[in-house]
Image: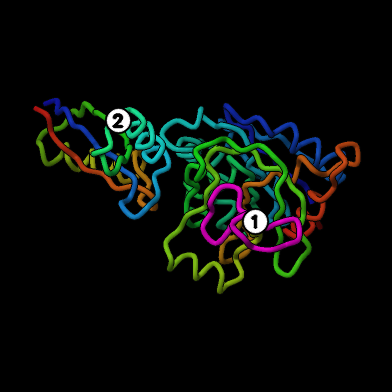
């Protein structure tokens, strides 16, 4: 069975995200002053062939932990979309 | 002793490094292709250098893909045997991603790629003028790791002003603790963002880079 998995990788909450800060400045210039904070991460989708959802989750978890994110600066969340 | 310089797809300081070591430091250099994995011609007295550049286009995170190349597997084994490894700029990022050095290099605080001369200093040394050229050079590690680095004397270089003061003014990218370069606990793996190989010849009117290579203790 093929599982479609999305992985959200975000900078750790207590880290300065200069990209998000720059975008926040742009949004304020646009007049959207109600926006208090912006943080920018990555959205990665995987197609995984696995016998079960648990097996697919284990594969996605390994991919996210070992390659797609770096725990020193990021955290990740895994979500199934089918 | 001799040096090996690893060439990844996207390395762009590999030839500068080769030239500086051969012509200015007068040491033998062997260029190493990332798809090869043979380091049998090196002993632990030798030094493998990971040069600057944009290996694998900086895709995913700087250095994140390069660490899985066949040559890096051999470099990690070489380092774990006590061989000397120096990573400069993208090479430093690769060493952090591969786990040979702690911490990570984040996007510069001002969001800009910075290419200019800065000042760095080692333990109680004079300020050295060395160029930097990076977009992701803001060293970051958690407080426990930072304390360990400082306590063990693992911080090789701090960014400073021309007069040698550790102030925000002298810190170009927002690095925590003004860190410009570190070594591992056993003292055989070195990483730094500034480019000493760009400052080793009189014709460039800056030879402070030679002092950097000497301070690392990799010339014997």
Say which chain tag 2 marks.
A
* Residue B171 part of the magenta-drawn span: yes
* Up/down of B218 relative to A61, above or below: below
Q: Quadrant of residue B59?
A: top left
How dense is the environment of label 1, judged by Cα within 10 Å: few (below 14), some, or many (20 and up)?
Answer: many
Position of B54 with respect to B130 (left or right) is left
* Up/down of A81 relative to B120, above or below: above
Between residues B110 and B26, which one lies in front from this camera angle? B110
Which colour scheme appears in the figure? rainbow
Q: Position of residue B31 (x, y in %)?
A: 71, 34
The residue labelled by disc 2 is: A31
Q: Quadrant of residue B20?
A: top right
Total marks shown come to 2
Between residues B9 and A42, which one lies in front from this camera angle? A42
- Could you tell me which residue is drawn at 36 percent across and 39 percent down? A20
Position of A19 with respect to B9 (left or right) is left
Say which chain tag 1 marks.
B
Between residues B151 and A52, which one lies in front from this camera angle? B151
Q: Position of residue B53 (x, y in %)?
A: 61, 33
- State the extent of the magenta-drawn residues as a range: B159-180
- Could you tell me which residue is drawn at 61 percent across and 48 percent down? B172
Q: Nearer the viewer, mark 2 or mark 1?
A: 2
The residue labelled by disc 1 is: B159
Q: Secondary structure at mark 1?
A: strand
Q: Secondary structure at mark 2?
A: loop
Q: Position of residue A54 (x, y in %)?
A: 11, 41
- Could you tell me which residue is drawn at 48 percent across and 42 percent down? B107
* Up/down of B107 relative to B120, above or below: above
How dense is the environment of label 2, judged by Cα within 10 Å: few (below 14), some, or many (20 and up)?
Answer: few
Distance between the Cα atoms at labels 2 and 1? 38 Å
């Amino acid at each position: 069975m093929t599982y479609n998995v999305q992985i959200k990788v975000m900078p750790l909450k207590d880290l300065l995200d200069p990209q998000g800060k720059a975008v926040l400045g742009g949004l304020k210039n646009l007049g959207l002053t109600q926006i208090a904070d912006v943080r920018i991460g990555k959205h990665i989708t995987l197609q995984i062939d696995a016998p079960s959802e648990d097996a697919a989750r284990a594969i996605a978890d390994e991919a996210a932990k070992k390659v797609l994110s770096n725990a020193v600066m990021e955290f990740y969340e895994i979500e199934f979309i089918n | 002793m001799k040096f090996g310089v690893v060439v990844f797809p996207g390395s762009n300081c590999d030839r500068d490094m080769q030239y500086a070591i051969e012509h200015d430091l007068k040491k033998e250099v062997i260029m190493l292709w990332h798809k090869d994995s043979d380091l049998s011609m090196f002993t632990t007295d030798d030094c493998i250098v990971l040069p600057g550049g944009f290996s694998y286009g900086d895709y995913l995170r700087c250095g994140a893909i390069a660490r899985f190349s066949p040559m890096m597997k051999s470099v990690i084994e070489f380092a774990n045997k006590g061989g000397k490894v120096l990573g400069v700029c993208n090479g430093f990022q690769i060493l952090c991603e591969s786990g040979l050095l702690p911490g990570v290099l984040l996007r510069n605080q001002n969001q800009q790629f910075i290419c200019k001369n800065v000042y760095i200093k080692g333990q109680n040394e004079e300020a050295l003028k060395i160029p930097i050229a990076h977009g992701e050079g803001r060293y970051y590690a958690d407080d426990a790791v930072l304390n360990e680095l400082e306590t063990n004397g693992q911080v090789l270089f701090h960014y400073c002003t021309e007069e040698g003061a550790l102030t925000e003014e002298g810190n170009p990218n927002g690095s925590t603790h003004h860190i410009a370069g570190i070594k591992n606990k056993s003292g055989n793996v070195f990483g730094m963002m500034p480019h000493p190989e760009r400052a080793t010849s009189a014709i460039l009117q800056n030879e402070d880079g030679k002092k950097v290579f000497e301070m690392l203790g990799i010339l014997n």
